Image (tube, rainbow, N blue to C red):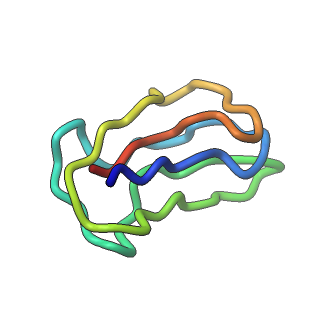
């Protein structure tokens, strides 16, 4: 079953660490967000293939889809 990774706050996408189609494991960092001069890692919570839904420089709102791990 696919695991959707959602933004927990309004933030800028500072760095995308993985690429579409990469295999990730539970605990791997997928994306690093920046909010109020703090870096917030977005972590995979399941093993599988990742599909990234954001790009560096994007602004995400709370609840926006960042990635899907299938």
- Find residue 68 and report its image quarter: top left
Q: Quadrant of the N terminus?
A: bottom left
Q: In the visual, does 12 lie left or right of 24?
A: right
Q: What is the x, y in percent for residue 65?
A: 56, 36
State which quadrant residue 11 falls in: top right
Q: Is residue 1 above or below residue 16?
A: below
Instruction: Name the residue nearer the viewer: 53 or 46.
Output: 46
Identify which residue, 26 or 38, lies in the foreground.
Answer: 26
Residue beneath the point at 43% across and 30% down: 53
Measuring 76% from the left and 40% from the top, which residue is drawn there? 62
Q: Give the residue at x 83% y 49%.
A: 36
Q: Kindly indicate the quadrant of the structure image that contains residue 28.
A: bottom left
Q: Is 32 drawn above or below residue 44 in the view shown? A: above
- Establish if 16 lies above or below 25: above
Residue at point 64%, 58% (across, down): 39
Residue 60 horizontal side relative to residue 36, left or right: left
Q: At which x and y percent is residue 35?
A: 76, 47
Q: Position of residue 43 (x, y in %)?
A: 47, 64
Q: How many marks?
A: 0
């Amino acid at each position: 079953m696919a695991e959707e990774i959602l933004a927990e706050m309004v933030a800028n996408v500072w760095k995308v660490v993985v690429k579409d189609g990469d295999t990730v494991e539970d605990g791997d960092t997928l994306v690093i967000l920046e909010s109020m001069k703090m870096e917030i890692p977005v972590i995979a919570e399941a093993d599988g293939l990742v599909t990234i839904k954001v790009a560096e420089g994007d602004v995400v709102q709370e609840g926006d889809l960042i990635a899907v791990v299938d």
